[in-house]
Amino acid sequence: MQFMFQYPDFHGIDGDMLDAGPVAELATTAEKAGWRGFAFTEHPAPTSKWLASGGHQSLDPFAALSYVAAVTTELKLLTYLAVLPYRNPMLLAKAAATVDKLSGGRMVLGVGTGYLKAEFFALGVDFEERNALFDETLDVLPLHWSGEPFDYAGRHFNARGVMARPMPIQKPIPVWIGGNSQLTLRRIAERAQGWMPLVGPAEMATTTRSPHLDSVESIRGRLEMLRELAGERFDALDITVAYIDRSVYDLSTDVERHREALAAFGELGATWVIVPGPQGEHPQARDFAEGFAETYINPK
């Protein structure tokens, strides 16, 4: 089981996301400390109301991951997560391929269908089409990354004789899908390389329009469903779980409890654990990245 650091989300508007610290410094600190990946989320056009009520700011994840790629050598680079229906599939495939090419094959495309209706409206995307658009993109990604000519007629585009070069290094770039629905699990079983269960309180499940998962046991039930759907493909899938217990930010207390909780993820079959950095002014997140690694990743 490996650990991925998520650059801290800044919730609200009374401050700036980068108050958590320079991206380059946090990325190089994480890599040196023993983290194996680095992640950014996205919200390209949230409403002021959503931000003011606790929504979070974000960078463009592809641009930010390219920046991380330039200052690191080994970290996996994850979009956590990119909303597929927001973009023309060609543009998304090219962005992911670019990060993969420039990073030496470290890109992981974490994706979801999205849930903020107002953001769909702002981007000119029909919210009711989101599942159809999601599946179109899953169709197009391997065609685009193949480097061979292809045709594809989508709902809002018609690609004829498209040939995308240069090709990404990975064949294919791993696609990890976030969500808890049966539809999500079927997509993963048939056409993805990993699952990112959405774990959190009941109100989060309502917001993200996904079934509620809040414990190892609730994840286990969905994992068994995925195992049945995926068959022989299951053992090759990455299972990436977020550790959302914010008390872990205090590295002086409850250490054994957190170790047991993280070990339970490993016993469940998780291959990755994502830990969001703490929201707070620099150097809080940097110090946490170092301290968490010393305590839980590479304890002496």
Image (cartoon, grey):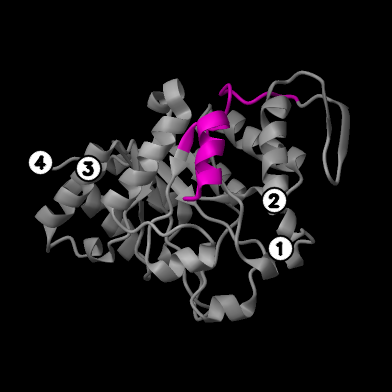
Which amino acid, mark 1?
A: Phe
Instruction: State which mark lies toward you, 4 or 1.
Output: 1
The residue labelled by disc 1 is 120
Q: Quadrant of the N terminus?
A: top left
Judge left or right: residue 76 versus residue 163.
left
Q: Are marks 3 and 2 in contact (CB under 8 Å)?
A: no
Q: Tag 3, which secondary structure?
A: helix
Q: Are marks 2 and 1 in contact (CB under 8 Å)?
A: yes
Residue segment shown in magenta: 165-194
Q: In the rendered image, is residue 260 in sight? A: yes
> Dividing the picture into quarters, in which one does residue 149 lie?
top right
The residue labelled by disc 2 is 85
**Residue plotted at (73% across, 20% down):** 147
**Is residue 21 found inside the magenta-colored segment of the image?**
no
Q: CA distance from mark 3 to mark 2?
A: 36 Å
**Residue plotted at (31% across, 65% down):** 284
Q: CA distance from mark 4 to mark 1?
A: 48 Å
- Residue 237: image x %, image y %? 43, 30
